[in-house]
Image (cartoon, helix red, strand yellow):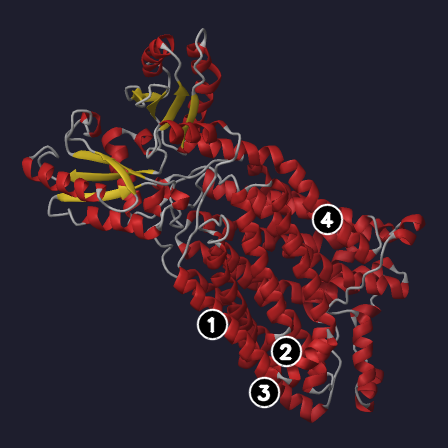
């Protein structure tokens, strides 16, 4: 690390230009190739997946994504001659567009059911040749543009569906701008130097921007969800600014102790830089845990997020040192520079609130530990009612065409039209056809079914499908109950005595199947992520207790964060006020991604806090002293980093994207709890109560474990090396220092 730091400082212009060249080159390539994101939830072997494949095989051209064009008249009816003529012409033009397989409107012999009872709303079904994840955005945009041309005074035309959703942006980059602005303010208040506060921002923007463009390119090579770039940016800005903050903080302390600019930068990268690399590696390991689920949808998210973290770590230990060498002593504020000139180098001792809080926790570990557990438990309680599913387009912003189409269909035909179920089966002989005719009647009388289309057979007569419109919306648990009822009760009875094997597909069925697969694999996934995290901490701190407490703390933070998400998004507490739409289920992939990200981020704070305690423990063998000093010397930096990360995460609520808002609120809640409740309250309280047992490790295990070294930013050994490197004046100051330090407080 020292050699890398010296190279970046000595060739600072080359280092900066290399990063700018990488950023510019990758961005140019991303702009040239365009995006190719896809939300492919299908999992091989599920019933909804088999239904989709059966439909594609039996009805070539009908296995693609089905979207809707909805029109509404303010006066008169949609059967008026001028409206009918306009929309027929529009639908014919849409049918001729590239990528469109067919268009079924309300004005032919079979379209009577596509006109509402009051005659003021109608819709047509546009079927694309491919599924949504394979549809080019330009093809979907052409459908939107063509349909919108039909709008006139008194005639409203809107479009809905998955493919149409590809054409809607997330509302610009307001979230990123707000998050970065808040982080800049916090950094300036912490440093008092404009130059020093801007460097972490610049480093994070360059690395995250490069990663964002890289994610766009990655979408052409594998399945990458459309929210992956924003998720990567959310994580990258948070950890990138924090990692840079740690290094800049260490560099500023080196300058205050009298080191030259180059010596201080090298020392900061050698010590804090190592901790940053370790922390970034833990985040990537946690994210890569998603790969064991073997789901294409999550593989792309894991790799995209890991790419962002890798680039932020790389920028922190290469680009940041180069930029620090450019600003020189301006990393300190004017007041700090003036004091350094007038009084010479001075030590930095933990005083003030951090020292008082550390002593307070030492005096009242039981009371504070119980208080922290009560807070975490209360926040985690809503997690018990967690319901996984996927929100529908009724949660989109009110100005979006998909939201307006959804509302028009709900008002005119009922909410179930927005997410019909598709029942598909092989047909073998007249008995099967008769059974299907009877099934049509049975379905109409089934609880929760609003309407059923007639059975449609393919040209060969060996495959048939029919469409069922539920009474409830796609995201409603009533619709999920209907899917389960069809699969477990209605269809098995109808198949008795026939060769029929009816498969239930459709939006809700697909989401429910995806959620079931996720839930089934979740224990294995959590076990792997927790196990890897514990192994890293075991190697770093040579203790059984530290990894076990860290695992328990991380699980507590995840549970409490999910409790907040359930309250806001599933129960709807404040969701409308925040502009996040109506209450609905929690996205099925959220638990997996959140566990990965939160375990990685929590590991940062755990390493930062406990490693300082570990240094003191090795030196003195006094657990109370080690915990007290570790908390006093690291809490301020942890809290500053947490405030920045929380600000960045909460800013993404402004993105206008429900999924990204979920991530933002969940991550912000988890980081707040982790930093202000767990790491600065519950963890030290428990460590005081456990005493020397914190650091116990069987000798046989100690002898067999490899040794790794992590130098935390506030390690005492590093402080002593810095003091030794300064001149005699510093030694004088250290010798004459009479103020009481947290180290002198009786244990």
Distance in Å between CA atoms under marks 4 and 2 = 31 Å
Distance in Å between CA atoms under marks 2 and 3 = 21 Å
Vertical comparison of 71 with 667: above or below: above
Disc 4 vs disc 1: which is toward the camera?
A: 1
Residue 404 is left or right of residue 357, and the answer is left
Q: How far from the left and from the top, in percent, is residue 184?
A: 51, 71
Distance in Å between CA atoms under marks 4 and 3 = 45 Å
Residue 480 is left or right of residue 279, and the answer is left
- In the rendered image, which residue does mark 3 sit on? 334
Vertical comparison of 180 with 432: above or below: below
Distance in Å between CA atoms under marks 4 and 1 = 36 Å
Q: How far from the left and from the top, in percent, is residue 181?
A: 47, 69
Q: Residues within 10 Å of mark 1 (few under 14, many from 20)?
A: some
Q: Earlier in the sequence, mark 1 or mark 2?
A: 1
- In the rendered image, which residue does mark 1 sit on? 24
- In the rendered image, which residue does mark 2 sit on? 321
Residue under the image location 45 percent in, 6 percent down: 497
Q: How far from the left and from the top, in percent, is residue 669?
A: 56, 51
* Displayed quadrant of residue 338: bottom right
Disc 4 vs disc 3: which is toward the camera?
A: 4
- In the rendered image, which residue does mark 4 sit on? 532
Q: Earlier in the sequence, mark 4 or mark 3?
A: 3
Q: Earlier in the sequence, mark 4 or mark 1?
A: 1
Q: Are marks 1 and 3 in contact (CB under 8 Å)?
A: no
Residue 49 is left or right of residue 291, and the answer is left
Q: Are marks 2 and 3 in contact (CB under 8 Å)?
A: no
């Amino acid at each position: 690390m020292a050699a890398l730091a010296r190279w970046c400082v000595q060739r600072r212009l080359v280092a900066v230009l290399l990063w700018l060249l990488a950023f510019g080159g990758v961005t140019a390539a991303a702009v040239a190739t365009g995006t190719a994101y896809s939300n492919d939830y299908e999992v091989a072997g599920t019933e909804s997946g088999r239904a989709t494949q059966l439909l594609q095989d039996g009805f070539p051209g009908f296995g693609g994504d089905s979207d809707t064009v909805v029109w509404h008249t303010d006066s008169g009816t949609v059967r008026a001659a001028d409206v009918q003529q306009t929309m027929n012409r529009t639908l014919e033009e849409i049918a001729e567009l590239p990528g469109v397989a067919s268009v079924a409107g309300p004005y032919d012999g079979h379209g009577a059911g596509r006109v509402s009872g009051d005659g003021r709303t109608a819709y047509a079904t546009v079927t694309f040749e491919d599924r949504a994840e394979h549809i080019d955005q330009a093809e979907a945009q052409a459908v939107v543009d063509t349909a919108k041309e039909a709008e006139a005074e008194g005639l409203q035309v809107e479009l809905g569906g998955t493919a149409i959703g590809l054409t809607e942006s997330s509302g610009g980059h307001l979230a990123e701008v707000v998050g970065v602005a808040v982080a800049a303010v916090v950094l300036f208040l912490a440093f008092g130097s404009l130059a020093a506060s801007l460097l972490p921002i610049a480093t994070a923007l360059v690395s995250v921007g490069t990663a964002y463009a890289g994610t766009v390119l990655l979408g052409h090579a594998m399945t990458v969800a459309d929210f992956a770039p924003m998720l990567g940016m959310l994580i990258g800005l948070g950890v990138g600014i924090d990692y840079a903050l740690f290094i800049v903080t260490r560099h500023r302390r080196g300058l205050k102790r009298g080191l030259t600019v180059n010596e201080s930068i090298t020392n900061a990268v050698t010590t804090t830089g190592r901790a940053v690399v370790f922390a970034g590696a833990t985040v990537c390991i946690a994210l890569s845990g998603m790969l064991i689920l073997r789901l294409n949808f999550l593989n792309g998210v894991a790799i995209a997020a890991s790419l962002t973290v890798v680039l932020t770590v790389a920028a922190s230990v290469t680009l940041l040192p180069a930029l620090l060498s450019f600003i020189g002593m301006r990393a300190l504020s004017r007041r700090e520079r003036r004091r350094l000139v007038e009084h010479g180098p001075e030590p930095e001792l933990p005083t003030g609130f951090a020292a008082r809080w550390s002593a307070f926790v030492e005096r009242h570990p039981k009371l504070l530990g119980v208080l922290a557990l009560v807070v975490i438990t209360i926040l985690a309680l809503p997690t018990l009612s967690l319901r996984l599913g996927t929100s529908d387009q009724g949660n989109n912003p009110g100005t979006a065409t998909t939201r307006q189409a959804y509302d028009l269909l709900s008002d005119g035909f009922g909410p179930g039209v927005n997410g019909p179920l598709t029942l598909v089966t092989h047909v073998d002989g007249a008995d099967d056809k008769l059974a299907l005719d009877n099934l049509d009647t049975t379905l109409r009388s089934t609880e929760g079914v609003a309407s059923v289309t007639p059975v449609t057979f393919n040209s060969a007569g060996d495959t048939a499908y029919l469409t069922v419109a539920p009474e409830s919306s796609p995201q409603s648990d009533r619709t999920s109950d209907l899917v389960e009822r069809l699969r477990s009760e209605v269809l098995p009875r109808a198949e008795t005595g026939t060769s029929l094997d009816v498969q239930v597909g459709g939006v809700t069925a697909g989401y429910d199947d995806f959620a079931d697969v996720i839930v089934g694999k979740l224990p294995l996934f959590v076990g792997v992520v927790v196990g890897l995290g514990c192994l890293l901490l075991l190697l770093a701190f040579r203790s059984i207790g530290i990894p076990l407490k860290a695992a328990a703390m991380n699980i507590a933070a995840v549970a409490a964060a999910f409790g907040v998400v359930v309250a806001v998004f599933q129960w709807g507490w404040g969701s409308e006020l925040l502009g996040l739409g109506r209450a609905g289920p929690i996205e099925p992939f959220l638990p997996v991604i959140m566990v990965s990200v939160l375990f990685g981020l929590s590991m940062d704070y755990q390493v930062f806090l406990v490693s300082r305690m570990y240094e003191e423990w090795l030196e003195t063998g006094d657990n109370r002293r080690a915990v007290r000093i570790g908390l006093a010397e690291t809490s301020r930096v942890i809290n500053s980093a947490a405030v920045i990360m929380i600000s960045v995460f909460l800013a993404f609520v402004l993105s206008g994207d429900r999924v990204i808002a979920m991530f933002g609120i969940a991550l912000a809640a988890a980081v707040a709890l982790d930093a202000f409740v767990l790491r600065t309250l519950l963890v030290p309280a428990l460590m005081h109560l456990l005493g020397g047992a914190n650091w116990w490790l069987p000798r046989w295990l100690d002898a067999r474990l490899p040794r790794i070294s992590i130098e935390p930013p506030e390690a005492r050994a590093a402080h002593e090396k810095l003091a030794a490197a300064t001149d005699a004046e510093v030694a004088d100051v250290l010798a004459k220092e009479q103020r009481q330090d947290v180290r002198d407080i009786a244990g």
